Image: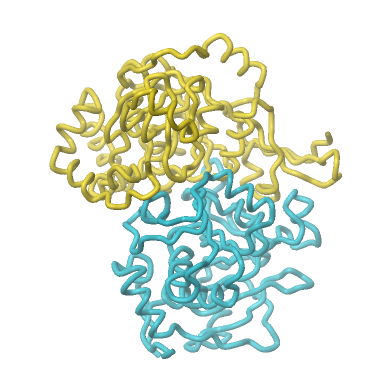
Amino acid sequence: MEVLDSGIGELFHVPDPDGHRAYLRENRSRALVEKVMTEQEAVSKFVSDGDYICYDCNMFMRGPSSLIREVIRQKKKELGIGGRFTYLPAILLASAGCANRIDIGYIGFGRILTQLQEKGVKFSEWSNSAITMRQLAGSLGIPFIPARFLGGTDAFRYSGAKLAKDPWTGKEVVLLPALNPDVGLVHVHQCDVYGNARIFGPSVSPVETVAASKKVIISTEEIIDNEYIRREPGKTTIPYYLVDAVVEAPFGAHPGEVAGVYVSDTEGIMEAAAACGDTSGAAMEQYLEKNIYSVASHQEYLEQRVGLEKLLSLKSRAKIKQGYS
Amino acid sequence: MTRASSFTEAEATVCTTAKMIKAEQDKSFWVGGGGTPLTSILLAQKHYVPNLTVVLEDGVIAPQPHIPLDPLMTFVSSKANYRAAAWTTMNTVCTHASLGLFDYGILESLQIDPYGNFNSSLLGGDYYHPGRRFGGAGGANEIASMCWRTILHTDQENRKFVKKVDFITSPGYLDGSPGARERAGLPAGSGPYRVITPEAVFGYDEETRYMKLLAISEWVEVNDVLEKMDFEPMVADKVERLEPPTEEELEVLRVYVDPRGQTIGSQKWINL
């Protein structure tokens, strides 16, 4: 196939389908085994310095907020981020010195993004769907996927995409390189002890994230018995052998919403947004200290930083329940 | 229907867009951006076209949002996703666009050039040392690439209408040459369609693909608009007058869609 043009953006992950297959064969259990562990154990075991991570969704909706906070608490270093449709997690990870490279689909909070780039965080430019399509390719075990967008722009220029001549139609088409993250972090509504997980509602790319990633941690609002999975197999979003660890994390998406369970904590979101908006960096330091470093676990965070009254209020204000069960 | 005489600039943009949506009510819309683009959709849905086919980036197909939406939660929230026909994922919506199922994309932007290429990534400097970064393409690139027509919102200011954008985040007609989009791998027949500001509506000349002024609001003349652009657009032989917001549209906006004025409460008021 004739390659006509290439983006000059650094590829923070180079496609390697056979490498990914070999990894999974060696490291991913196919047996139906229990995988429940604490967030501390899961992050310690499955997130290593230098890993490239993707998470679903973000800190506003059904995101693995408690896992992200644990990654920062354990001071993981030199992480890469697949930044599609994200606001807080990417900014917090980079601000805390955990992440040093970001594939940009959309990162809310531009001012602090500028500062992070000045401090040496590397960017490659994509778009939201460019990254989710890259994840799709990764989840299909193929090295790239053609696409009908991104071409002709500076987003293409500063990405790692290519433009090629399609061998069947002879027309130009963009090629997006596969993305197989080292780590996938996904928050779900329900999960059994083996990793069979259910997500209710729309999403960014949870199935692609999980299937494409080498090491997968699921945080779940509640652990349900495998019996319920067996009764309604159609509701399973993620089957167990795509998962390495299951962490029980009620209110695990806080300050974000989990549709049908609790609403987003506007106060908490505004506090985080203010931290991202303070160019001096002082508010961010305080935010990280208060919400991450000064508490030992998600449980302590909920008890000491959020409080029962707030949690009950978030739960009771979640009146929209249709479709989320 | 009563013509309103006092409204904000944002309300003008939103109402112009909602009228356009009404005129194309059997078409489909992919909206990106929680500000005036989404507000225009919500107004059109509440006031004109209850069964509007609209999709959101996170895979929500034809929602009937539970308005008003909460601050910062204009997307990916149970209120925005309410009573959709289907809940899918980002790739589903992307692939439906790729299939040619979406007629109009509605977006906003920082800068736009004469061929409709626009910028939401950075201003000043270069990619490695920008003056200032912004969020990035988000869904704008795929929306502008694959919807049949793109409608863009921006302000009528010189710094927004520039000869050359600092960064082409999303495609218009690229360098304006015939077939430029197709040579970049984008679907044939797709392209920018309208730019809407509070004061004007622009289209693109059929032969040259260059931006062309089509209509202006009641409170300005053509020169007022041209003065607030850093390039000179073509001007239609007959420049139409835009209808101002109606009192009915404003009531729906102010009571149901955006009672806190998050989007419509912009600084400048227009009094006719």
Q: Residue furthest top?
A: A26
Q: How many marks?
A: 0
Residue A81 in sight from this viewpoint: no
| Picture colour for chain B | cyan
Q: Looking at the rendering, in which quadrant would you find the N terminus of chain B?
A: bottom left
Name the quadrant containing residue B152: bottom right
Q: In the picture, which chain is yellow?
A: A
Q: Residue at x 51, y 62 (%)?
A: B108
Q: Position of residue B91 (x, y in %)?
A: 58, 43
Q: Looking at the rendering, in which quadrant would you find the C terminus of chain B?
A: bottom left
Q: Residue at x 40, y 44 (%)?
A: A87
Q: Position of residue A307 (x, y in %)?
A: 15, 37
Q: Nearer the viewer, residue B55 or A122?
A: B55
- The relative height of residue B60 versus residue A254 in the rendered view (above or below) is below
Q: Residue at x 46, y 45 (%)?
A: A202
Name the quadrant containing residue A74: top left
